[in-house]
């Protein structure tokens, strides 16, 4: 089973236990990571996550998965679905960073016809919620849902049913969602609905960052290397022990996504005839100490300040993969203010190629 890596600002994917079908935007495949790569390793930290996934799979309530940026949370949600009795039904992924509220409402609920009863939420037969019935609906980055969409989701979770063209229907999907660590801050400031949070967090899985499970990095790195080589049609390669020791010693602020990108760069720059990735290959790919560009004065102080603000905000957005809530928290500003500042500085609000 191949997982899709969130590499686009607009994405919605319908997934079953056998196949992944892109529905909306373009998405780049995360090369060949079968199952849940985040669950590899034998550290106590990931052992606790295994136990929580096992417990959650045996139940049928909502689940909230929290993690730092760069964690492949979708793979954990897919593993939870695979281990559950719903494994043969649909696993539907909706990226909540799709954009404006109207678009997300259409993706999740479909188009509401005029003059329908308002006793229940209306759901079209071609909506993601309807498709997920009997299976699992995974809301990735649920904290980015606009308030109006949060309210509609919360109502369906509360009522346990919705209305379609036929009649009132039970909401038979299981709701799984992901959010960053510290989502409680958005709940306290009412940027995320407390009632929806309480229902989601009835079962919570906190995924540890790689720096808290350094002993797992070598096995994760070997798995990523194997999958990258397979995806690119290359002979199987391995790491030297020194290379694995280097990977295990780094803090990986970008977590598994960063680890993947570093290994991919090392593979592409490696001697095609070589079978072993050396520590020198990784040192070039990690870019531990990039050279400082020489300072060349240009413009007045105001121009320099604007250039700095634009470059800094753009780099923070890039680091958080253009997830506005996480970037705003890092910058110490409200999300609406970040949107306004980005527009003022001419920063595009969709992810650009790296």
Image (cartoon, rainbow, N blue to C red):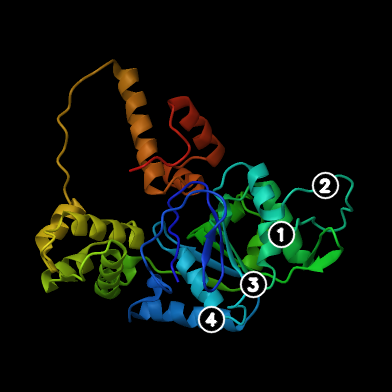
Residue 135, label in figure: 3
Task: Using residue 39 as the reference point, say whether residue 196 is left or right of it.
Answer: right
Please give the name of the residue rendered at 41% of the width and 62% of the height, measured from the top-left corner: 71
Rendered view: 303 above or below 121: above
- On the rendered image, what quadrant is the C terminus found in? top left
Say which quarter of the image contains residue 163. Answer: bottom right
Reading the chain from its start, which is encountered first: label 1 or label 3?
Answer: 3
Badge 1 or badge 4: first in the primary sequence: 4
User: Local crowd at mark 3 within 10 Å, few (<14), some, or many (≥20)?
Assistant: many
The mark closer to the camera, 4 or 2, is: 2
> What kind of element bears circle 4?
helix
Regarding mark 2 in the picture, which secondary structure is present there?
A: loop
Q: Is residue 149 left or right of residue 56?
A: right
Could you tell which of marks 1 and 2 lies nearer the N-terminus?
2
**Of tags 1 and 3, which is closer to the observer?**
3
Indicate which label's residue lies in the foreground, 1 or 2.
Answer: 2
Q: CA distance from mark 3 to mark 2?
A: 26 Å
Residue at screen point 42% across, 48% down: 321
Q: Nearer the viewer, residue 131 or 233?
A: 233
Residue under numbered circle 1:
154
**Percent coordinates x, y for residue 14 in the rendering:** 57, 62
Q: Which residue is mark 2?
A: 113
Q: Secondary structure at mark 3?
A: loop
Helix, strand or loop for disc 1: helix
Identify the image quadrant of residue 38: bottom left
């Amino acid at each position: 089973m191949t997982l899709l890596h969130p590499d686009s600002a607009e994405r919605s994917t319908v997934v079953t236990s056998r196949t992944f079908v892109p529905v909306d935007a373009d998405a780049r495949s995360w090369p060949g990571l079968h199952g849940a790569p985040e669950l590899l390793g034998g550290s106590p930290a990931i052992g606790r996550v295994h136990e929580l996934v096992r417990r959650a799979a045996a139940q049928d309530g909502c689940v909230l998965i929290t993690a730092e940026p760069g964690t492949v949370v979708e793979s954990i949600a897919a593993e939870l679905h695979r281990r559950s009795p719903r494994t043969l039904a649909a696993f539907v992924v909706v990226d909540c960073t799709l954009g404006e509220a109207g678009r997300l409402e259409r993706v999740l609920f479909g188009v509401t016809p005029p003059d329908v009863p308002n006793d229940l939420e209306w759901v079209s037969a071609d909506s993601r919620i309807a498709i997920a019935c009997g299976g699992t609906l995974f809301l990735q980055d649920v904290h980015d849902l606009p308030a109006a969409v949060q309210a509609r989701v919360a109502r369906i979770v509360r009522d346990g049913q919705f209305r379609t063209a036929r009649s009132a229907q039970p909401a038979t999907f299981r709701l799984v969602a992901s959010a960053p660590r510290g989502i409680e801050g958005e709940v306290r400031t009412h940027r995320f609905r407390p009632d929806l949070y309480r229902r989601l967090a009835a079962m919570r899985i906190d995924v540890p960052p790689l720096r808290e499970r350094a002993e797992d990095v070598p096995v994760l790195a070997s798995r990523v290397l194997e999958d990258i080589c397979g995806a690119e049609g290359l002979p199987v390669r391995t790491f030297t022990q020194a290379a694995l020791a280097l990977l295990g010693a780094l803090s990986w602020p970008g977590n598994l996504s960063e680890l993947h990108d570093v290994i991919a760069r090392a593979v592409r720059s490696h001697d095609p005839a070589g079978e072993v990735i050396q520590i020198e290959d990784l040192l070039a790919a990690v870019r531990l100490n990039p050279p400082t560009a020489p300072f060349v004065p240009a413009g007045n102080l105001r121009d320099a300040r604007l250039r700095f603000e634009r470059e800094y905000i753009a780099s923070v957005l890039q680091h958080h993969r253009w997830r506005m809530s996480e970037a705003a928290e890092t910058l110490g500003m409200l999300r609406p203010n970040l949107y306004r500042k980005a527009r003022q500085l001419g920063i595009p609000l969709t992810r650009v190629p790296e």
